[in-house]
Image: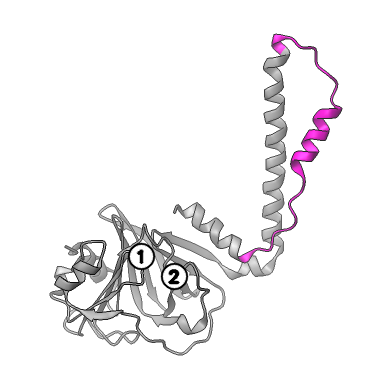
Amino acid sequence: MSELEQRLTQLGRELDWPETPDLAGAIGRRLATEPAVPESPPARRRRPIVFRRSLAIALLALLVLAGGVVAAVPSVRDAVLEFFGLQGATVERREELPRIEPGQLRLGEPTTLDAARDDLDFEPLIPEAAGEPDGVFVDTTVPGGQLSLTYRPRSGLPEARSTGVGLLVDEFRGDLAPEFMGKIAGQATRVEEFTIDGEPAIWLEGAPHFFFYRTSDQPIVEDQLRIAQNVLLLEQGRLLVRLEGAFNRDRAVELARSLR
């Protein structure tokens, strides 16, 4: 899903649209009242041009109307200040954040790397710069499966307040679940879009932000939110990889580049 499609999807969730005007009927009535043009080759060449011009004017008016509605409704204008998206994840910067208690980690069932390969529709990526994971978990309710890796705090991986571990890695097929993972950030959270070796990435740092999962048949509720610390979101082909910890951006990029 492209960034434009994601923005339009988010806008559709927030906005109460007015009744759609009868543009086709108005154009039809206008054409019916225009004087007949003698049938001649030049006239037949011009009539499609006149119709396209009328249609373009009508569509332009509709876009202006839609823009005016967005600007006039405070709940739409203020709810989402900025919107960022990758294949598999969205990030929204909001003026106000919900008040919640720290949530639980959603990690799936404990397993091993060898066993996880049988439950996933992708080959797991391991950050070699962090060594072997201390915990491996798989959630088969996610399309294609979700892999979670945990690493105990150590040198270069300080303990994160949000997870209690030094590094949490989540991986899943972003092409199968285009908006599965979501984040809500306040104005104090730094949100940066960039690329790592040509792959799109988003870095969130500073003030804690909220993290949640969404499914196509369930609404998001507050008890599904949890507070997250610094996070790097990275596309790796069909995969969406999420790295969370108390490390800085340079360390996150180092870990991302060591994924094998």
Query: Is 31 contained in the magenta span?
Result: yes
- Which residues are the magenta region? 14-42
Is residue 245 in view from this perspective?
yes
Assign a secondary structure to mark 2.
Answer: strand
Q: Residue at x 27, y 80 (%)?
A: 109
In the image, 237 versus 65, the foreground residue is: 237
Residue 65 % position (x, y): 72, 51
Give the quadrant of residue 118. Answer: bottom left
Residue 12 % position (x, y): 60, 60
Residue 135 % position (x, y): 20, 81
Amino acid carrying mark 1 in the image: Pro
Assign a secondary structure to mark 1.
Answer: loop
Q: Residue at x 45, y 62 (%)?
A: 84
Quarter holding the N terminus is bottom left
Residue 51 % position (x, y): 71, 28
Query: Could you tell me how far apart the alpha carbons at marks 1 and 2 are, in whole angstroms?
Result: 16 Å
In the image, 237 versus 199, the foreground residue is: 237
Q: Residue at x 83, y 28 (%)?
A: 32
Q: Which residue is mark 1?
A: 143
Amino acid carrying mark 2 in the image: Gly
Is residue 241 in view from this perspective?
no
Q: Earlier in the sequence, mark 1 or mark 2?
A: 1
Q: Is residue 97 above or below residue 8?
A: below
Q: Is residue 33 above or below residue 96?
A: above
Q: Residue at x 41, y 82 (%)?
A: 227
Q: Which residue is mark 2?
A: 182
Q: Is residue 91 above or below residue 149?
A: above
Q: Is residue 213 left or right of residue 233?
A: right
Give the quadrant of residue 128. Answer: bottom left
